Every structure is written in C-alpha cells, then in structure tokens.
Image: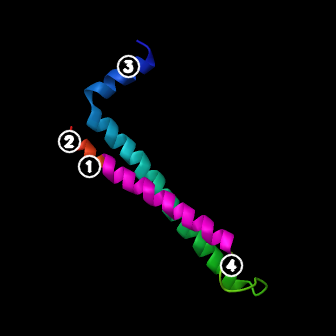
Amino acid sequence: MPVLQAAWLYYLENPAFVLNGLALFYGLAGGWLWVATQLRSARIAERLATDPAMPGDVPCAATQRINRVFYSVGGVCLSLATVLTLISTQF
C-alpha cells in the first residue's frame, strides 16, 4: 500500500489524533518564535548596555518592527494551536 494512501486511511480512522499533532506543531512553532524573540531582545538590550559606542538606548525601528512581526506570527500560531486542540475534542 502506498504511503499516502496509508496516511489518508490513518487520518480517516483517527482525526482527533491528527488534529492534536497539528496543534502540537503549531504550538511548538509559536512558542519557539516567542522565546527566540525574547532572547534576541535580551541580547540587544545587553549589547546596548555594555557598548558605549552604540547610539541611543532604544533599538532601531526596523528591529522593533521585526520583533513585532515575530510576536504576531507566534501569537497566531499559538492561537491556532489552541483552536485545533478545542476542535479535536469534538471527535
């Protein structure tokens, strides 16, 4: 039996398990984005505090914009994971 047919039959027999697996994937991706952005912000703050040659106390606008995008995508992933988990309880 080809692999795709076996996967499709497994999906038809266990839809809640498959949805929970997808929710786990989105939850891990969203959590990783949040943690990576926190670490990135901490490194920038540390570099600003220790290097007197760096201008200003606030990171540039582009860095803040990228951090905001990462937080938004991470939040969407975590929200989607929550919704998929709630949907999987209906099966």
Q: Are marks 3 and 1 in contact (CB under 8 Å)?
A: no
Q: Is residue 18 above or below residue 26?
A: above
- How many neighbours does mark 3 have within 10 angstroms: few (below 14), some (14-19), or many (20 or more)? few
Q: Earlier in the sequence, mark 3 or mark 4?
A: 3
- How many neighbours does mark 4 have within 10 angstroms: few (below 14), some (14-19), or many (20 or more)? few
The residue at the point 26 percent across, 26 percent down is 13
For mark 3, what is the residue? 6
Please say whether residue 74 is one of the residues in the magenta stretch: yes
Q: Earlier in the sequence, mark 3 or mark 2?
A: 3
Residue 90's disc number = 2
Estimate the spatial distance between the alpha carbons at disc 4 and disc 2, rounded to whole Å.
Answer: 49 Å
For the C terminus, which image quadrant?
top left
Displayed quadrant of residue 57: bottom right
Q: Are marks 1 and 2 in contact (CB under 8 Å)?
A: yes
Q: Is residue 68 left or right of residue 77?
A: right
- Nearer to the camera, 27 or 58: 58
Q: Earlier in the sequence, mark 4 or mark 2?
A: 4
Estimate the spatial distance between the alpha carbons at disc 3 and disc 1, rounded to whole Å.
Answer: 26 Å
Task: Name the magenta segment's main secondary structure.
Answer: helix
User: Which amino acid lies under the numbered mark 3 shown in the image of this protein?
Assistant: Ala
For mark 4, what is the residue? 47
Determine whether the residue tagged by mark 2 lies in a helix, strand or loop. loop
Mark 1, mark 4: which one is toward the viewer?
1
The residue at the point 32 percent across, 28 percent down is 11
Residue 31 in view (yes/no): no
User: Which amino acid lies under the numbered mark 4 shown in the image of this protein?
Assistant: Arg
For mark 1, what is the residue? 86
